[in-house]
Image: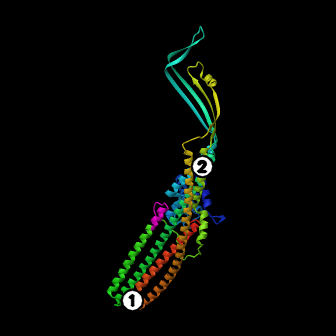
């Protein structure tokens, strides 16, 4: 029976697995069931094989599902490490959006700022429920020993006399009380309004922290790309130097080059190789800095997408236009505005001390005394009491404390106003500097691109002259050095332009990507 069940499952799986293209075509099996399985062990082995195949297929399907989920169809399967990342429900690190999002999520400073915002949210909730009545319950139990004044009844006369006796007693009391603030000089609504504005300011601070880390990541990202391309240029210089050295060695073999020229060519190769090692080290250090900003444990397997070889120059918006856009969207300005607005409520909270306070209170209670000759339940019922009342507190003189709190609140408001003005001033200066830097980087990139093209053409002509014997090694090396410098200057100008324009986009409220 067990073998029949297993055979049924395997036959169903075989029929499903043998469908190709046209579902109406089922390949005919060339192996009979009798020759395929001789005993239960064969069937069990086949079952295990089918299970392993299913698991492998499911794993591959899950990987592709991860690719679909993250929107990364091309990059996630590039290597076992990337596949493992997707399989573990992780986003590959070679996606720029994921890098910034991952850094924002895991950065320590941002997490601290987020905690501060959450604290402000709790304070809003506390101020919101301050209008509601409070409710308190209490219960007590006491024991007494020693001489106690006790009343004794004279049975003949019916009179009571007081005597002192050594006795022990105990008592129980229970109560429930509540109080409702009816009027607090408008302190409660202003506390609630202030808490909400403080929350908005804290959220703006959190957004500013995210913007700062995004700028730092963008700068580090472009620095990595610059060092990577510079390293590639230096490797190209090494190849050119090796070709020149081989050429000089061949000329020396036929007596057309001196040993000094061969030695100089080898020295040039060694110098260029040393330069390539240095540029490679700079690239690795820049990659390390970026991986730490993104909060990665290691830069190993960290790949970056390179921008286009040539970039399109876009006309820059005027600094005044950018400034007007920045006033409405920059988190630093919004946080200062929220705090200035909140200072108005701080003044009103301080002024509430001039007004009387009206509170409604009430309570329910009962008690039990062991010295009274009645049961516990009887005393709980007999001693039950209710209370309700109003309490009006009128401030007359509190040693000028209220006046000083109002003065302090007004000074704080003035400071917040000055902070807002200073923030706007700093923002205007930053935008002006960013615009001039962007304009200068645009001109630098245009001129450096032209210089690189000219140096490349010059080096090509010099190479032809050198091969034809119309130029010496000194002239060739000079042309090669000029080419490398021009290419390096172009790369630096390129990434500087990208970064400067990103800064302008940042001030316009566009997200950094």
The quadrant of the rendering that contains the C terminus is bottom right
Label total for image: 2
Disc 1 target residue: 472
Q: Position of residue 251 (x, y in %)?
A: 37, 88
Asked if residue 294 lies in the magenta stretch, the reply is yes
Badge number at residue 124: 2
Along the line of sight, which residue is nearer the eye, 257 or 16? 257
Relative placement, left or right, of 274 versus 307 is: left
Q: Earlier in the sequence, mark 2 or mark 1?
A: 2
The relative height of residue 394 versus residue 263 in the rendered view (above or below) is above
Query: Colour scheme used in the picture?
Result: rainbow
The relative height of residue 36 versus residue 182 in the rendered view (above or below) is below
Q: Is residue 54 visible?
A: no
Q: Residue at x 44, y 88 (%)?
A: 462
Which residue is at the far left? 259
Residue stretch in magenta? 286-300
Relative placement, left or right, of 298 versus 30 is: left
Q: Verify CB contact (< 8 Å) between mark 2 and mark 1.
A: no
Asked if residue 274 lies in the magenta stretch, the reply is no
Q: Position of residue 161 (x, y in %)?
A: 55, 13
Which residue is at the far right? 24
């Amino acid at each position: 029976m067990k073998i029949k069940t297993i055979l049924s499952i395997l036959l169903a799986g075989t029929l499903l697995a043998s469908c190709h293209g046209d579902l109406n075509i089922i390949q005919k099996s060339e192996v009979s069931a009798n020759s395929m399985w001789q005993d239960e062990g064969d069937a069990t082995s086949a079952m295990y094989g089918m299970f392993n195949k299913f698991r492998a297929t499911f794993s591959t399907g899950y990987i592709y599902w991860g690719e679909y989920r993250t929107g990364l169809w091309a990059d996630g399967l590039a290597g076992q490490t990337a596949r493992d990342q997707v399989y573990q429900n992780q986003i590959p690190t070679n996606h720029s959006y994921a890098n910034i999002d991952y850094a924002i999520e895991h950065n320590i400073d941002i997490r601290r700022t987020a905690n501060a915002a959450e604290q402000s949210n709790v304070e809003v909730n506390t101020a919101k429920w301050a209008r509601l009545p409070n409710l308190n319950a209490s219960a007590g139990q006491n024991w007494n020993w020693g001489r106690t004044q006790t009343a004794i009844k004279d049975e003949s006369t019916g009179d009571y006399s007081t005597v002192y006796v050594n006795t022990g007693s105990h008592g129980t009391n229970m109560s429930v009380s509540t109080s409702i603030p009816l009027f607090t000089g408008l302190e409660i609504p202003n506390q609630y309004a202030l808490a909400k504005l403080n929350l908005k300011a804290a959220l703006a601070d959190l957004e500013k922290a995210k913007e700062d880390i995004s700028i730092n990541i963008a700068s580090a990202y472009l620095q990595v790309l610059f060092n990577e391309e510079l390293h590639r240029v230096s490797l190209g210089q090494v190849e050119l130097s090796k070709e020149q050295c081989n050429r000089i060695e061949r000329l020396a073999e036929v007596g057309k080059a001196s040993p000094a020229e061969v030695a100089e060519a080898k020295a040039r190769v060694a110098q260029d190789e040393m330069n390539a090692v240095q540029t490679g080290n700079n690239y690795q250090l820049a990659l390390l800095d970026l991986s730490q900003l993104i909060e990665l444990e290691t830069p190993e397997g960290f790949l970056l997408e390179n921008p286009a070889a040539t970039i399109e120059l876009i006309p820059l918006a005027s600094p005044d236009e950018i400034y007007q856009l920045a006033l409405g969207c920059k988190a630093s300005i919004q946080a200062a505005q929220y705090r200035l607005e909140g200072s108005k409520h701080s003044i009103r909270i301080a002024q509430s001390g001039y007004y009387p306070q009206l509170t409604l209170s009430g309570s329910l209670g009962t008690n039990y005394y062991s010295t009274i000759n009645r049961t516990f339940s009887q005393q709980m019922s007999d001693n039950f009491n209710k209370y309700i009342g109003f309490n009006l507190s009128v401030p007359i003189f509190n040693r000028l404390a209220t006046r000083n709190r109002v003065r302090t609140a007004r000074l704080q408001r003035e400071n917040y106003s000055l902070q807002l003005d200073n923030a706007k001033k700093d923002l205007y200066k930053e935008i002006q500097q960013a615009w001039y830097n962007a304009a200068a980087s645009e001109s630098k990139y245009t001129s450096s691109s032209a210089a690189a093209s000219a140096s490349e053409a010059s080096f090509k002509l010099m190479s032809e002259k050198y091969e034809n014997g119309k130029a010496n090694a000194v002239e060739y090396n000079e042309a090669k050095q000029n080419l490398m410098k021009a290419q390096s200057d172009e790369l630096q100008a390129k990434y500087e332009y990208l970064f400067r324009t990103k800064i302008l986009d940042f001030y316009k409220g566009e997200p950094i990507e």
